[in-house]
Image (cartoon, helix red, strand yellow):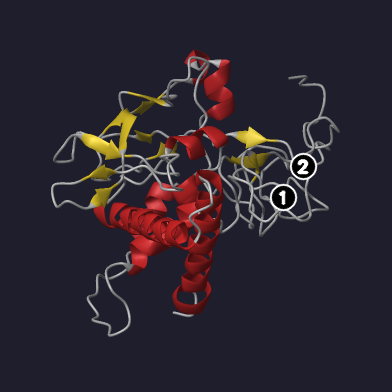
Amino acid sequence: MDFNVCPFTDPSQIPICDANAPFRTIQGECNNLRQPFFGKSFTPAARILPNMFDDGILEARSIAFNGGTLPSPRKISTTIRIPETSITSPDFTALFVPFAQFVDHDTDHVPVTLDADLEPIECCEEGQFISETQKTEEEIQLCNPIAVPRGDVLPTRCINFVRSVAIDNLECSGGPIEQLNQITHWLDSSNIYGSLPAVAASVRSFKDGLLATIIGDDGQEQLPVDPLTNCTGTATGTCGLAGDLRPNEQPPLGAIHVLFLREHNRVARAMKALNPGWDDERIFQESRRVVNAEYQHIIYNEFLPI
């Protein structure tokens, strides 16, 4: 790749869009034919409000509107207390929050910057701030550790905090850094099907349009095992594999992943029965389109109104 050329304006990098294409692309390009990069994976996250960098370019905000220094986020989180309440509701169930997380995992995943060896960066040393003279250039650029006030229940004075991966804007016109979104920005069920071709391939069986599964102890379809991740906190010590990297963060979220996995395969089997002449690819894409329509219907007609 030529880093002197903006990939978002380089003609050789711009996706060729087919206005009559019947199915969404896996990477999210070409939903907007005039701006084919809009919503594509590995492009800048869209902003609702302008940035508030201290220097207008990249320095994290530290100055209050009155000119004073902003307090530590830790001080704010331990000072502002929201009373714990338990209010029963006839409308909401325990799935309300994990479904919100499921939707979030379909639209954004901003990665944290790693070091040159692709290892996590530590901005604190044994719970204490690293002196300016001992900081590497990498730590100066990427670390923004959080101060723990004296008297806090935490025994440390420093909470590790690393800046997210930065990227130029779609015009590569310079100015404030943007944050990289490594998944598609659309409600396109990328949490089920992936945001990159390799991920999309890893969740498919390539038979009769079905997603890959394992059969659980209950005889039902479950997420396949992720061979690259170890989940030591689970009963089997294995992680489920899905289109998004985060299906194992909590059991209810994983349950929703399983639900949509089974729904895709239910639809695919129905498609196969109705259209015995269709090949695997056609069944998969048609089923993906139906499941995504169901998913969007739930979001706009049931989830968002409440």
Q: Picture coordinates of residue 171 (x, y %)? A: 82, 41
Indicate the quadrant where residue 151 lies: top left
Task: Give, as a three-letter code, the residue at label 1.
Answer: Phe
For the C terminus, which image quadrant?
bottom left
Residue 178 to residue 304: above or below: above
| Residue ID at (18%, 39%) | 233
The 10 Å Cα crowd at callout 2, few under 14, some 14 to 19, many 20 or more, is some
Q: Identify the residue position indicated by label 2 in the image.
A: 170
| Residue ID at (56%, 24%) | 140
Task: Give, as a three-letter code, the residue at label 2.
Answer: Leu
- Is 2 or 48 nearer to us in this picture? 2
Q: Residue 38 carries which label?
A: 1
Q: Can residue 196 be seen in this view?
A: yes
Mark 1 or mark 2: which is in front?
A: 1
Residue 71 to residue 12: above or below: below
| Residue ID at (46%, 48%) | 209
Q: Are marks 1 and 2 in contact (CB under 8 Å)?
A: yes
For the N terminus, which image quadrant?
top right
Residue 305 to residue 12: above or below: below
Task: Specify the farthest residue to the bottom.
Answer: 90
Q: Picture coordinates of residue 235 (x, y %)? A: 13, 41
- Is 52 or 263 nearer to us in this picture? 263
- Is 159 or 72 nearer to us in this picture? 159
Q: Residue 286 carries which label?
A: none
Q: In this view, does 254 lie to the left or right of 39?
A: left
Q: Which secondary structure, mark 2?
A: loop
Q: Picture coordinates of residue 116 (x, y %)? A: 53, 16
The 10 Å Cα crowd at callout 1, few under 14, some 14 to 19, many 20 or more, is many
Q: How far apart are marks 1 and 2 (CA)?
A: 9 Å
Q: Picture coordinates of residue 112 (x, y %)? A: 50, 34
